[in-house]
Amino acid sequence: MRLALIFVFFISKLNAQSFQVPYDHQIPNSRKIEIQVEFLNEFDLERETVFLLEDAFDALFLPFDELLDFPVSSNFVLIKGRKDNAELKTGVMLSGNPDCQLAYKLYNQDQVARDIEVIRKELLGGKQVILLGYSSSAMVLQHYLSLYPDMVSRMISVNPLVFDIQKNLGFPDVGLSFPSFNLNPEHLFDFSYYSNFEREMANIKSASFSNLIGFLSYQDVLRGFSQATNVENDFALQVRLFEHSIALSGLESNSQKPNPNFELLKKWSGPIWERYLDTNFPVFGTNYDDLLSFQGKMILIGGAFDQLIYPKSYDILAEFYSNSTLLLLKDGHALQKTAGAHGLHQLVGAFISNDFEQKIAAYKKLANENLIFEKYNEGDFKILPWF
């Protein structure tokens, strides 16, 4: 399978295409800039089309699209986005120093979502698209869904970072504390992203401690924030970090320990935060009420042992959709355990192709490998097994 993926990505490099999008969607008749799109297989307008988004945040960790098979029944289009556009960076640096307010204005999730709609119109005309997003990209694609609900037939959202739901419903901090280790916020964040817990062990703390030891032993081969060295000049990444941190902001109080995820996200997006606190410039958030009008199918796949975000957020998110399926896996945020099981590849492919028999087969495969999580500690939790 790995050779097949390498072949697919080799072909994709030969099928890159640039699209013209507005420099700033909020300015009428704005001049145009180019953003890159890669076709991961041969494009055929007669087939359904899946959009994936390359996000600056996710690129630090796990290129989720590399873990997937690509069913030949659909087109797969990877949107590289405005994060790589030289004109935008030049504009932000025009005065010689970064204009952090302009950086947010040009790289925020609303700009990216409207870029996606320009691409959809040019490629598909009036046809709907399937969205597939993981982690940070899933958050941006959900914002697109809130703006253009009629343009999406299905969305598959894997571990979406809906920190705003976690904050607004007062879910507890899921960070871990091990006094015997001197862990900085970078270590905790990396551990949260990569951790996979064996919660079936009798002693949960021992299980977490064991995974921490394993993480510290192998963290030198992982890509994470503690290894990020060029955040200062990466405005697209800073903006996404700012968006995630502002979604988390307000969780800290005198009666609570500081949230290490919030601390680190705010630290790496510090210049934008400083400008925001000085000017209180407007910030684009997702209007969840607009998601109520989406009539397509929403598939939410979450890691039940995710330490980066409280997993019950996905339960609440599912309530915004009239036609949703929520599947929780015995895994962490990076899905390192499940990614090794072909059942996940098969399941995502089945949701894309909407193949009922393949859905059942993939679900059974994951269940046989003991990767399906069926309830929370807070109480019983129903998951529809046959979608």
Image: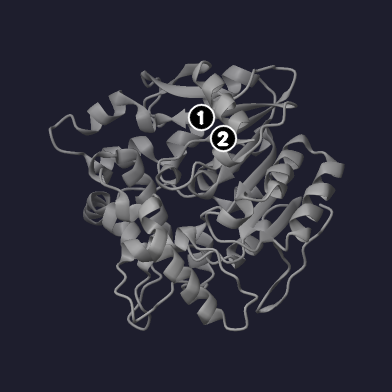
Q: CA distance from mark 2 to mark 1?
A: 6 Å
**x then y, percent, for residue 291:** 63, 48
* Residue 52 badge: 2
339 horizontally vs 44: left or right: left
Judge by depth and name the residue closer to the eye, 74 or 172.
74
User: In front here: 31 or 354?
Assistant: 354
Q: Position of residue 355 (x, y in %)?
A: 82, 39
Q: Which mark is residue 79?
A: 1
Label 1 crowd (10 A; few <14 / some 14-19 / many >=20): many
Q: Residue at x 43, y 74 (%)?
A: 176
Residue found at the very far right of the displayed protein = 357
Q: Is residue 172 visible?
A: no
Taking 377 as reference, is 370 above or below it? above
> In which quarter of the view is residue 296 placed?
top right
Q: Position of residue 361 (x, y in %)?
A: 83, 48
Q: Residue 105, can we see it?
A: yes
Q: Secondary structure at mark 2?
A: strand
Tell me which residue sits at (21%, 39%) in the image: 99
- In the picture, the quarter occupied by the N terminus is top right
Kindly identify the amino acid type of the residue bearing the numbered disc 1. Answer: Ile
Tell me if residue 218 comes above or below residue 112 in the rendering.
Answer: below
Horizontally, residue 137 falls left or right of residue 107, namely right
Q: Verify CB contact (< 8 Å) between mark 2 and mark 1.
A: yes
Q: Nearer the viewer, residue 260 or 166?
A: 260
Q: How many marks?
A: 2
Q: Position of residue 158 (x, y in %)?
A: 60, 50
Q: Nearer the viewer, residue 370 or 29?
A: 370
Q: Residue drawn at (46%, 35%), measured in percent from left and top?
A: 112
